[in-house]
Image (cartoon, grey):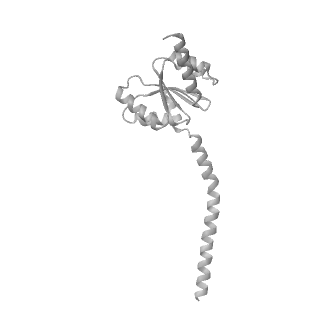
Amino acid sequence: MKKEDKAIVISMIGDTLSQYSCVYLTQTAGLNAEKTSALRRACFKEDVKMLCVKNTLLKKALEASDVDYSELYDLLHGETTLMLSNTGNAPAKLIKKFRQKDETLPMLKGAYVEETVYVGEESLETLANIKSKNELIADIVALLQSPAKNVVSALQSGGNKLHGILETLSNK
């Protein structure tokens, strides 16, 4: 590959990286074509972008980025597949779901999620259990609505009781 072509590929990888807040480095070597296609389809359904890249080109794109990915540089060996998402736990959940079919791949090399670096396969469970921004917002809204719902419920039940008492008195 010519130097000019490499520069174009590096800038394309860099542009793609800048569009996503979460970067997962995985290893998918060993998956046959059918399983790789199934993984790509699953990624598409979950809004996760999957890219197979050369480590040297990826490292140069990471170095050129505004974000400090320096802790991920040591993980760039062997075959590397990028999984990019704007939801922090989506790729981890996708990997766990894909592995339920007695798979050992894809393996997690590392991840950069919400300005935190996770290294190694043992981080997969932690990443899958992290709540996304939308899930946290939903929890907060539910907590805020709970007291208001209790007050409305108490007022409605009190109104029904009062109505029942008045109706009973009027019948007598």
Pick the quarter of the image with the C terminus.
Answer: bottom right
Q: Which of 4 and 101 is in front in this view?
A: 4
Q: Nearer the viewer, residue 103 or 90?
A: 90
Residue found at x 37% / y 26%: 31
Q: Residue furthest top?
A: 2
Position of residue 155 in the picture relative to residue 74 (left or right):
right
Residue found at x 64% / y 68%: 155
The image position of residue 152, as x and y in percent, is 63, 64
Q: Nearer the viewer, residue 122 or 151?
A: 151
Residue found at x 43% / y 35%: 42
* Residue 22 occupies quadrant: top right
* Residue 96 occupies quadrant: top left
Q: Nearer the viewer, residue 168 or 23?
A: 23
Q: What is the number of callouts on the image? A: 0
The image position of residue 60, as x and y in percent, is 57, 16
In the image, residue 111 sits, relative to residue 59, either above or below, namely below
Residue found at x 59% / y 27%: 18
The image position of residue 88, as x and y in percent, is 55, 35
Q: Residue furthest bottom?
A: 172
The image position of residue 135, as x and y in percent, is 57, 44
